[in-house]
Amino acid sequence: FSTRLVVREISDRLSSLRDNCSANLSDALQRMTQGDLTVQVTPVTPPITDFSRDELGQVAVRADVTRTQEIERMLEEPYRRWGRLDVLFNNAGVIRVQPLLEVTEAEWDRVLNVTLTSVMRATRAALRYFREVPHGGGIVNNASVLGWRAQHLQSHYAAAKAGVMALTRCSAIEAVEF
């Protein structure tokens, strides 16, 4: 029973983070970190690293999410620092608004690698960890309404986010036993 309350509280905090990120990242992260929840922010740009260190007093790990080894290193950090990993929040994504006829194969690959394949890499690494520990864990994958709704000039991003939605459903079925 108490585990469910903790999971619900973390879920509520993650929902708050997701809903408020674009409007006010500082407020959302501060609300999320109230109480016993410890946050590891993995930035892609130095200003977020500085923000998390200065504002939250937590750890930031810079990682290239297109590289499996860096994702594994990123997910080892909370275990090294705090002895456990409880929740993974996948939020990587890139977008370049352009017509499909102008999307090069390299751009298509870049968008899908960051926006979808990185989610698979991190989910896989976290599931390997959660499978082995008695406390289990949770994964939140941030998708987009574009995963199911068409929008002009965003074919590659929409395809990646639809993939995130499908990956989330399928991996949840596989992970239900642990």
Image (cartoon, rainbow, N blue to C red):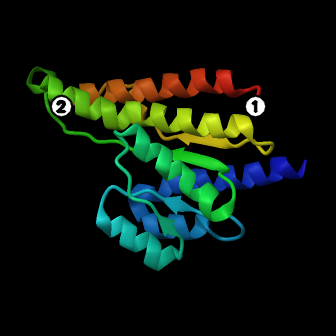
Mark 1 vs mark 2, foreground winner is 1
Residue 110 is tagged as none
Q: Residue at x 40, y 60 (%)?
A: 23
Q: Which one is in front, 9 or 41?
A: 41
Q: Nearer the viewer, residue 34 or 53?
A: 53
The quadrant in which the C terminus is found is top right
Question: Which numbered marker is on residue 178?
Answer: 1
Q: Quadrant of residue 125?
A: top right
Amino acid carrying mark 1 in the image: Phe
**What residue sits 88% from the left and 52% below the top?**
2
What is the spatial separation of the Cα atoms under label 1 and label 2, in whole angstroms? 37 Å
Q: Name the spot of residue 129 as percent of width and height, x first.
A: 65, 40
Asked whether residue 152 appears in the rendered view, the answer is no
Residue under circle 2? 107
At mark 1, the secondary structure is loop
Residue 138, percent from left and from top: 66, 42
Label 2: element kind? helix
Residue 49 percent location from the top left of the image: 38, 67
Give the total of numbered labels: 2
Q: Relative to residue 166, is residue 86 drawn left or right? A: right
Res 62 → quadrant: bottom left
Q: Is residue 93 left or right of residue 87?
A: left
What's under tag 2, amino acid-wise?
A: Glu
Closer-to-camera residue (113/128): 128
